[in-house]
Amino acid sequence: MITSKIISNGILRALTTVLIVCSVLYFLYEIQTVIIYLCISLMLCLIANPLIQFLKNKLKFSNSLAATTALLVFIMLLVGFIFLFVPLIISQANNLSLLDTNNLQQQFAYLERDFENYFNLQHLDFGALLKKSDFTSKIDFSYFTGFINSILGVLAGFGMGLVSVFFITFFFIKDQDTFKEKAKQILPDSNEDKIINSITKINHFLTRYFIGLMLQLTVVFILYFIVLIIFGNKNAFVIAFLCAILNIIPYIGPIIGTVLAGILTMISMIGSNFQTEILPKTIYVIIGFLIVQAIDNNISQPIISSKSVNSHPLEIFLVTIISGITFGIGGMIIAIPFYTMIKVILKEFFPNNRIVSVLTERI
């Protein structure tokens, strides 16, 4: 018989459960930065895993020495990545310094005259209008100091995040065997084998995925570099590298890379004739990039991605699109790794479910 006491206890348990869940979610929200650090460190650990195995098995490195070596490789790549773009920045700044401001002012005057003639307007003196509106008095110059402070804050945060990620990554690599043993002691005995198998398979598939992603980016970089070399771009290596990195963002990244390549190509040719040199070469570069994207989207990306995580190319496409619509660019980037983790877990815990067996038949 259901009494008021039983109902009250049920309500109290439900409220307590909701309160605990909300508290956990709020706590996770507050430490989201730490969670991001952990995820990045885990990703770096998975990428470094083949190197770690080579150093430990072939060269007989200790865990600490192998972890230190892998970390030094990451640091060298980061430093190389930073110094790689210094020449590009200097080159583009020099090109902009060659810009003929007098000619630009004359072009603006022509544009103003055409605008007035088209709309039958009297001569507009923009300088007088600015003075009359007292525009400068309405500018809050504190925004400039705030902007500078925000830039310094971003740089400080990036530096702290970088140190934190490398620190966590070092211990993830060095003590990964210890972490596995500790996890076995904590896990419930009834599901210990399933959980260990899931972690092992996830580690295997994600390692293959990130290696496949690096291979795909390398192919795209080489093709971009060839296109830029053919059309005589002075900063072909750096631009190709930057545009290839943007390919990490599925579908949107290549578009951004193409626009960026076009802009950098135009800037690098400032001082040349726009109609006969700048515009044709920019169009050729964009067409070349579109051809590379067609090759990547239809050949290299589906093959490499599907083989690395044992999923159908259409399955990968749909998961990526749905994640992008739901969670934006970040969702598109993590869609395939997260989806692979879910499939592996479902395969281990619900192998007899029909839907699960169909989705995971290739795992």
Image (tube, rainbow, N blue to C red):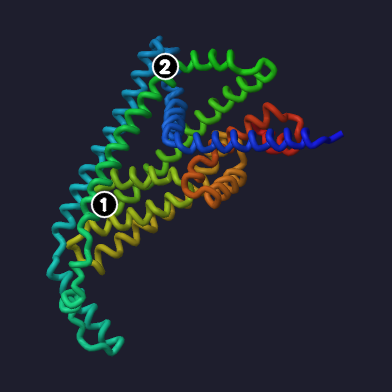
User: What amino acid type should be assigned to the residue bearing mark 2?
Assistant: Lys
Residue depicted at x 62% and y 41% = 312
Task: Name the side, left or right, on which 38 lies relative to 230.
Answer: right
The quarter of the picture where the N terminus appears is top right
Residue 344, image x and y in percent? 63, 30
Please, is residue 346 above or below residue 329 in the view? above
- Furthest residue to the left? 102
Residue receiving disc 2: 174
Towards the viewer: 287 or 168: 168
Residue receiving disc 1: 233
Please, is residue 200 above or below residue 272 in the view? above
Task: Name the side, left or right, on which 75 lies relative to 353.
Answer: left
Please, is residue 49 above or below residue 88 in the view? above
> Which secondary structure lies at badge 2?
helix
User: Could you classify mark 2 by the number of other residues whose Cα lies within 10 Å: few (under 14), some (14-19), or many (20 or more)?
Assistant: many
For discs 1 and 2, the disc positioned in front in the rendered view? 2
Q: Earlier in the sequence, mark 1 or mark 2?
A: 2
Residue 320, image x and y in percent? 55, 46
How many marks do you count on the picture?
2
Task: Name the side, left or right, on which 79 lies relative to 350.
Answer: left
Residue depicted at x 55% and y 50% = 326
User: What amino acid type should be assigned to the residue bearing mark 1?
Assistant: Asn
Towards the viewer: 102 or 136: 136
Residue 208, image x and y in percent? 51, 30
Residue 40, image x and y in percent? 43, 32
- Which quadrant would residue 242 be assigned to in this image? top left
Residue depicted at x 52% and y 48% = 327
Towards the viewer: 226 or 363: 363
How far apart marks 1 and 2 lie (CA) works out to 44 Å
